[in-house]
Image (tube, rainbow, N blue to C red):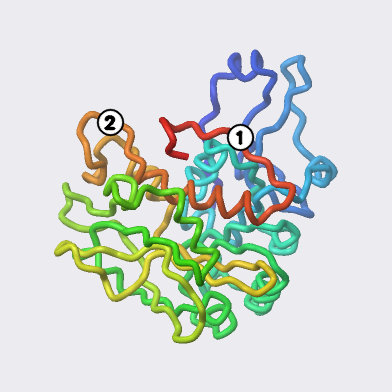
Amino acid sequence: MPMRMLPQPYPGILKSLGLGKLKQLGDPVSRDTDVLATWVPSSGDGTVTDPSSTTFGTGTASRLAFYVPGNVYSDYPGWLPLYKALIFQGIPVTVTKNIKFAKNHPTVIAYQALQSKYMGTTDSSTWSRYVSDGHTLIAIGMTSSDTLITSTFGVTPDMTTNTNARKAIALNAPIASVPASNVNSQFDLTNTNDAQIPLWRRDLGTGFPTIGYTVSAGSGTFALGSYLTNTGANDTKQAITIKSTSNGGHAIAIGFDVGAYVGESTGGRTNGIPRSYDAQYDPGYDNIFRMIKTLYSTSTPTGLVTSWPVPGDKG
């Protein structure tokens, strides 16, 4: 199947900024790292030099590794807007298909990677050890029923999306007995716009597709976000969960495709998710990125981030 090409910015603009082109999915990639997307520096004379494995090898391991294995990049094209959104939020990111390369970073986003059809025979043990060794794994769209995976996250996934009922994700207040829940202390939980991530597609009469998680008894897993139904009551399944290890490891499960959500929630009333008609800033869209940024910066000792491109104290 031919690779889909990404639109290129105007070359004159790139040259004036000293930049090259955006590496295409169909271009040769590093055999060692299988990097999918990165900005390629220009030599200054307008020519472009493709990156090599040596180029990627010189980068620090403090970057957030964005793991997009197998055919995920084509099955779930939302990986690209998610990658761009992370960059815009000031998080240094490297995108890779190689699990060995990804696990060398203190924080990994596994994008749709923890589904049985994309997992290798040793993936579950690799990620279980990764978290138990004190690292942070953020899984988007995790549906695997592998016992090592479910015990690592402390949840059981439910593929029933309940799109006719789930209207938002309500962020839960942190509790002292679960230190990792403090990631939610940055949100104004008294303000609905800041305390909820909207999911309801008013123009379609359905919610954004979701996966629900049941927290395993005695696992110590905390629900960072719970689904709200159209009646305002909590759903029986959880939306965002976190389980921590004694040595600082974290396993976070996010039950919706954040990449696809980026495009839909900020697409100018696309399907009716935006809560206003005048394109005003809505912190609810950014909440998941604020959460990821905090998890990354607190889990990566040498991780550096840039300032938030959002209004006021939201970020």
Residue shown at the point (33%, 44%) measured from the top left = 264
Instruction: Report the side of 137 relative to 165 (left or right).
Output: right
Toward which corner of the image does residue 272 lie, by quadrant? top left
Binning the other alpha carbons within 10 Å of mark 1 as few (below 14), some (14 to 19) or many (20 upward) gives few
Residue shown at the point (68%, 74%) measured from the top left = 132
What's the amino acid at mark 2?
Ala
Q: Position of residue 235 (x, y in %)?
A: 26, 71
Q: Position of residue 128 (x, y in %)?
A: 65, 76
Residue shown at the point (29%, 76%) measured from the top left = 236
What's the amino acid at mark 1?
Thr
Position of residue 65 relative to residue 151, above or below, is above
Element carrying mark 2:
loop
Q: Residue furthest front?
A: 176
Q: Are marks 2 and 1 in contact (CB under 8 Å)?
A: no
Q: Earlier in the sequence, mark 2 or mark 1?
A: 2
Mark sitting on residue 113: none
Q: Which residue is mark 2?
A: 279
Question: Real-space Cα distance between discs 2 and 1?
Answer: 25 Å
Nearer-the-camera pick, 301 or 24: 301
Toward which corner of the image does residue 26 lie, by quadrant? top right
Element carrying mark 1:
loop
